[in-house]
Amino acid sequence: MALLSVENLSAYYRTEIYGISRTVRAVDGVSFELKPNEIYGVAGESSCGKTTLIKVISGNLKPPLKVNSGSVSYHFGIHAVDMLHISQEELRRDLRWKEISYVMQGSMSVLNPVRKIIRTFEDIVDTHEGIPDKKRFFEQVREHVNRLGLPSEVLTSYPHQLSGGMRQRVAIALATVFHPRLIIADEPTTALDVVVQRGVLQMIKDIQAMSNNTVLLVTHDMAVHANVADRVMIMYAGRIAEEAPTEIIFNAPLHPYTQHLIHSLPMIGERSNKVSLRGAPPNLANPPTGCRFHERCPYVMDICRTEVPELVTVQDGHRVACHLVKENPL
Ligand SMILES: Nc1ncnc2c1ncn2[C@@H]1O[C@H](COP(=O)(O)OP(=O)(O)O)[C@@H](O)[C@H]1O
Ligand SMILES: [Mg+2]
């Protein structure tokens, strides 16, 4: 059974400035599932709705963000949770950190700059479980960070004494202290240089392998997905363009947008300049009609301008929303 089922989810930012209301359709009709024990990647260029999607599924809804329609349900063993109707109290008490951990974009900010790292661990564990035995608690935290390959000294450091990569790894260690069933990481490697990125990605892979949990990894960086994800969802302008096992996304992509993302990845030894997409990403307050990609698509047809392409399953586990694919099935 799926760990998470998201069905037809739409979430919009509704703002009103000087009497002018504006609706940003950041997530629009998204359906997908997360399986136990997988690393699922969410890709797509900046502003396509990745962070909004995970805000909704992690229960971090705050105005002006509102769910317009759809459902988000978790299955934790025999325990089912309707994320869109759960109380804040239940969410805080039973789910956050324990079942679902969210390593936010720029997550190093969860670390309080004026407190040593161990104090942040103490604050979180104390609020959620209480700490009956301090000495044992310190031992457990030390074991936890060591198991994740971090030296014990990080615990007695202040955040500013650590490098960016180390801070990110500490944020991930913090998020996994209760062994949650789902770890959501939003652009965990984006601010880091390539060598440091590798360490952070390896850490995510190790945690997943050790604990058999599910990781939802959000990043615009396709090279990261190629390295760690089992399956990848490609988002474009608030919708799913394509979803498939990583191998298929990289070797046999069907959506023209996915093809563009793959072809613009740098190859070793390559000299030629990459072709960029024409036009700019759409404005989600006023998205294009039909297929949202049509204005930039090299294969645009008439139907693309008027009809929204359905997300169809072309092969087991491979879904694509493109009129071209629908007209020329595999
Ligand atoms: N607080 C907000 N108010 C209004 N619009 C927002 C807000 N946060 C994000 N958006 C808009 O929602 C869209 C999706 O943003 P986001 O989910 O952050 O994308 P991504 O994570 O893929 O870069 C963008 O058009 C962005 O400008
Ligand atoms: Mg984002």
Image (spheres, helix red, strand yellow):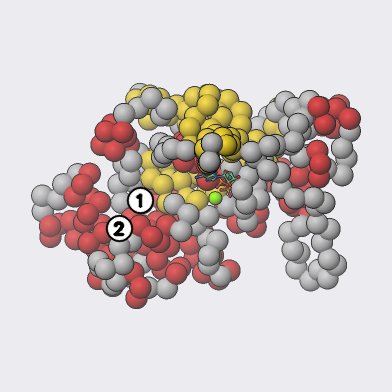
* Amino acid tagged 2: His
Closer-to-camera residue (64/153)? 64
Closer-to-camera residue (148/86)? 86
Q: Are marks 1 and 2 in contact (CB under 8 Å)?
A: yes
Horizontal side of residue 134 vs 15, given as left or right: left
The residue that appears at 12% across and 57% down in the rendered structure is 134
Circle 2 SS class: helix
Query: Quarter-wise, where is residue 303 in the image?
Result: top right
Horizontal side of residue 16 vs 295, given as left or right: left
Residue 165 visible here: yes
Q: Earlier in the sequence, mark 1 or mark 2?
A: 2
The residue that appears at 26% across and 59% down in the rendered structure is 120
Q: Position of residue 268 (x, y in %)?
A: 75, 68
- Whether the residue carrying mark 2 lies under 8 Å from ligand 2 is answered with no
The residue that appears at 68% across and 43% down in the rendered structure is 283
Horizontal side of residue 311 vs 128, given as left or right: right
Task: Please give the residue where the numbered disc 2 appears in the rendered image.
Answer: 144
| Residue 47, disc | none
Task: Please give the residue where the numbered disc 1 appears in the rendered image.
Answer: 176
Closer-to-camera residue (228/130)? 130
Q: Position of residue 90 (x, y in %)?
A: 28, 31
Viewer-side label of 1, 2: 1
In the rendered image, the quadrant that contains the C terminus is top right
Query: Quarter-wise, where is residue 322 in the image?
Result: top right
Residue 143 visible here: no
> Label 1 vs label 2: CA separation?
9 Å
Closer-to-camera residue (171/17)? 17
Circle 1 SS class: loop
* Within-10-Å neighbours for mark 2: few <14, some 14–19, many 20+: some
Farthest left residue in view: 132
* Within-10-Å neighbours for mark 1: few <14, some 14–19, many 20+: many
Q: Position of residue 191 (x, y in %)?
A: 53, 65
